[in-house]
Structure formats: C-alpha cells, structure tokens
Amino acid sequence: MELTQAIASRRSIRNYQDNATVTADQVKELIAAAIQAPSWKNSQTGRYYVILSPEKMDEIARECLPEFNANNCVNAKALIVTAFETKRSGFTREGVAENELGDEWGAYDLGLANENLVLRARDLSLDTLIMGIRDGEKLRAKLDIPESQRIVSVISVGVRASDPEMPKRKAVDDITRFF
Ligand SMILES: Cc1cc2nc3c(=O)[nH]c(=O)nc-3n(C[C@H](O)[C@H](O)[C@H](O)COP(=O)(O)O)c2cc1C
C-alpha cells in the first residue's frame, strides 16, 4: 500500500470483524516497523507486551481498561501494551536530563515508533485503536512490567467491520507559521 494511502485510510477502529485473525508473525511485523523509527541517540527505548490469547485479552480488557475502551476492543485479535525505558531518551550517559523535557522524550520516541506500527498495520490490511485511557498500574502488575518502564498506551489490533468517518482535522494554515 502507498504511504499516502496508508496515512489517509488509517482510522481509530472501535468496531472489529469477529471472524478475522491476527497472528504473532503479523504483530512481529508491526513491531519491526516500530523499531525502524528514529529515536533520541538511537536509544530505542520502546517496549511491547503483546496479548494474543482470547482469555488473557478478555482479562486485560475487563480489568485494565474502562468499560468504554473494553467495548471498543470487542473482536480485536491482539492487544499491544506499549511502554518505554525511562531516563535514557533525553538523558546523558550519566543519567542527567539534556533539557527541560526529560522523560517526555521517551514518550516522543514511543509515539514516533507507534505511528510506524499503526501505519504498517494498515499496510497489512489490519486496523488499530490507540488507547491512552487505561489503568497503568494494573497493567504493570498483570504483565510484570518493570518499574524502570513507563507504561503508555494499549493498542488494539484487528480488522475493521466498517469504515468510520474521519474526525474533522484542522487546516494547515491554522496551525502553522512560516518565517
Ligand atoms: C495518545 C492517544 C490516546 C488515545 N486514547 C484513546 C482512548 O483511550 N479511547 C479511544 O476510544 N480513542 C483514543 N484515541 C483515539 C483518538 O480519539 C483518535 O485518534 C482521534 O479522535 C482521531 O481519529 P482517527 O484516529 O480516526 O483519525 C487516542 C489516540 C491517541 C493518539
């Protein structure tokens, strides 16, 4: 799929086909695309926790997501919890923040990586929903995620059951200043 087509056709999908499949190999392709993203000093601090078993997906959705997001994932075939190692991206080797953003650079890098991930999903005719409203500490306990990592989003993966409208976007001229 052309990049412009992948960008244009990606939508947040909250309604998935029940009879679709998502394999571990496909999820590995998504994460391989995430790894290609640029990162602070090539620090590559993104980490991924993949849930494919229907029972575990159900448990994570019920216990770690609010009801509306659990409902958004019904019939998704994978959940990917995304996290990053703290105090590396944006920091010197000695662990000193390079500037006022500190660990926000880790979140920045993870966002870049995750955009690759969701666009690669489109490329494979898969669909995604990035969820930022989740219970990070419950995810940490259930998936044994170390304290050195900040837990960021849960991304559902499946195949869209219908094509949602694109939510309205701002105009380039409204958000850009040229000098
Ligand atoms: C960081 C982030 C967090 C989000 N969290 C949620 C969420 O918890 N639940 C949800 O339904 N959508 C969530 N979304 C999806 C946005 O609502 C969606 O991207 C936006 O409305 C634009 O729609 P589109 O993705 O279809 O273009 C999130 C998106 C991002 C990037």
Image: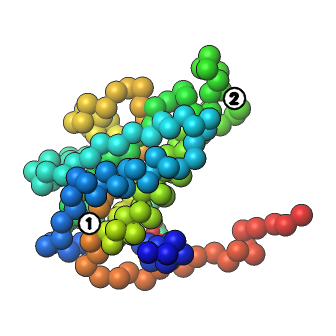
- Residue holding disc 1: 158
Q: Amino acid at mark 2?
A: Glu
Q: Are marks 1 and 2 in contact (CB under 8 Å)?
A: no
- Res 51 visible: yes
| 8 sits to left or right of 69 | right
Q: Quadrant of ligand 1?
A: bottom left
Residue 52 location (% of width, % of height): 19, 52
- Res 69 visible: no
Please state which of residues 138 and 19 is positioned toward the viewer in this rendering. 19
Q: Is mark 1 within 8 Å of ligand 1?
A: no
Please rate how many residues cluster around mark 2, counting C-alpha atoms within 10 Å: few if below 14, some from 14 to 19, many from 20: few
Residue under the image location 62 percent in, 16 percent down = 94
Please state which of residues 149 and 132 is positioned toward the viewer in this rendering. 149
Query: Please, which colouring scheme is shown?
Result: rainbow
Q: Secondary structure at mark 2?
A: loop
Identify the mark at residue 104; answer none if there is no mark.
none
